[in-house]
Image (cartoon, rainbow, N blue to C red):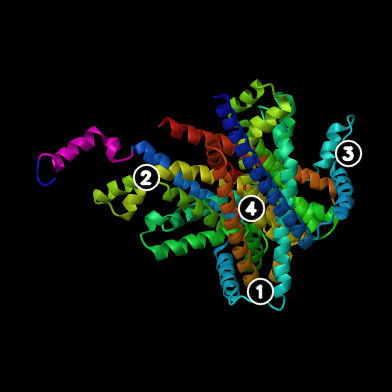
Amino acid sequence: MKGGARCIDAAQLAVLRERYPRAFARTPRERAVFAAILVGLAAFVMFGLYQFDASPVRIWNGLERFGKIAGALFPPTPGDAFWDLVKAMLETIGMAFLGTLIATCIAFPLGFFGARNVVKLPLFRFPIRRSFDFLRGVDALVWALVYVRAVGLGPLAGVLAIATTDIGILSKLFAEAIENVDRKQADGVQATGANAVQRLRFGILPQVLPIMISNALYMFESNTRSATILGIVGAGGIGFHLSDRIRAHRWDEVGFIIIMIIVVVALIDFISHMLRTRVIKSGTNRALLLETYHEQQRAGVR
Amino acid sequence: MSSQASAAIARFEEEFARLRRRQRIQLLVFAAILLALFFGAAEVSNFRLDRLLAGLPRIGEYIGKTLPEIRINSFFGDIAYWYYGFFRWLGLLLDTLLIALMALLFGSVGGFLLSFPASRNLSGNVVVYFICRRLAEIARTVPEIVYALIFVVAFGIGPLAGFLALSVHAVGAMGKLYAEANENIDERQLEGIRAAGGNWFEMIRFAVLPQVLPNFMTYTLWRLELNIRSAAIVGFVGAGGIGQELYTAISFNYYEDVSAIVLMVVLTIMIIDLVCERLRHKIIGKDNLQ
């Protein structure tokens, strides 16, 4: 590279710059658009902060108070309720597990009804798909509050809340998995003289089952996170203790509970991830492909 | 010949029966484990069938009560009566939207900055990588509403607390997602920039960003959908938006308000989801054309 004709000197560079301006810099129009976007964002932020009533004094005082709180989180201590907290944590996991299990059982048939290649008439499919949207559009915490009113305080409300949202999410994911199956296998089963049920059982189910299990496991993982907060509205689990300690400003205990949540969630994530990898690997190649697709879909729903 | 064939068939049958047996045993073991887990979970979370059956009719009753009375001959009057607080709720819904969008902006900028030191292949320093990655994971594990509870104490009741809560959570969540996208890039382009004498920032700008920007944009749109959902509920603990109103309506049994507000929230979420999906397809479509 040293010296030779391959190197470009300043004059050549200037020529090139003139001939291909876009390779060297943005056009004035692009620069104007970029600047306009920046100005717009800045204006939006100013408007937002104004709307939130965020004066510098308020932010400063808040940060100071937050600093004190953050300092008070350490050293974390369970107070005198360590076993109560452990019990509440187990209750949280139990709620997530039951909610997911119930939702999976209900979403399994619903998924077939929402799939384009099973229910062919859009007239039937449309209201089913929209009701999935409605179920998952309402957050589990809202359902929890409603169920607490209907069935009373306690984890039952939490289980039902998780199940309700999950029916919406899982049915949608199941329906999409079923829509994406390889038709040829189902056709092959049909060609041997199978009826509609046998076609589902031997042509479609083997393809989608690994994905369904993987999705259910993923939802269990995500529900463990949601279940930690349902107690805030009285629907059982660790959330009750957490909001109780925050309202009483017992920050060291808050710190302990938060660490507990982080550890348990990480543990459940790890176990679920391990199981999911095994389930998917035992499936076909297609399952692997669909799983990558669903990985993206799920990031959207949760 | 035929004895050979029948022997082969017998071998096949034997093998088939063996596989079936193994499958059945596996199935039984899994069923047993699942059942044990089910009873364990039912035990710790106090889940009883009789309580569930007693509760189910009350849920139906409750939902029935929230539905407004709408007659054909006074249709518009009934709708107006049902949505008597429409403009106030609309204002609160806009607040909710603002919380979600502001948190999206701060969260994506924060996550963007955090993602580079939190990527194994870009951070250059294992300690920095480890700390940044764990920081992002911890920030995203703590639920928004817990941050909201704490920020309400620190910053006072109102949307500021909700915005901050969602932002902190989003920085963690997006930092992790972005970092994962960074780790999946084609490393050869990094080497190209490095070989041409580019520094770290030039490497990020010219080797990483062109590869990950479409991913970042789809993740950001996903985040918007999640942020809207969270912004609608942080009001439960006093952190602004429509949640406060919904909480009051449910707590004080203003039945018809509950259905009215929930319907508005769900419609908003559906619209945002739809818009995001369109935009996502557009981004992915453009990406595929290139």
Residue under label 3: B69
Helix, strand or loop: magenta stretch: helix
| Local SS, label 4 | helix
Q: Where does the magenta region start and end?
A: A5-26
* Chain to which mark 1 belongs: A
Q: Hey, what amino acid is under mark 1?
A: Glu
Label 2 Cα crowd, 10 Å radius (few <14 / some 14-19 / many 20+):
few
- Residue B15 visible within the image: yes
Q: Which of A185 and B70 is in front in this view?
A: A185
What's the mark number on residue A253? Answer: 1
As measured in the structure, the alpha-carbon distance from the residue carrying label 4 to the one carrying label 3 is 38 Å
**CB atoms of marks 2 and 3 within 8 Å:** no
The numbered mark, 2 or 3, whose residue comes first in the sequence reads 3
Label 4 Cα crowd, 10 Å radius (few <14 / some 14-19 / many 20+):
some
For the image, the number of numbered tags is 4
**Position of residue A13 measured from the top left corner of the image (x, y, whole percent):** 18, 40
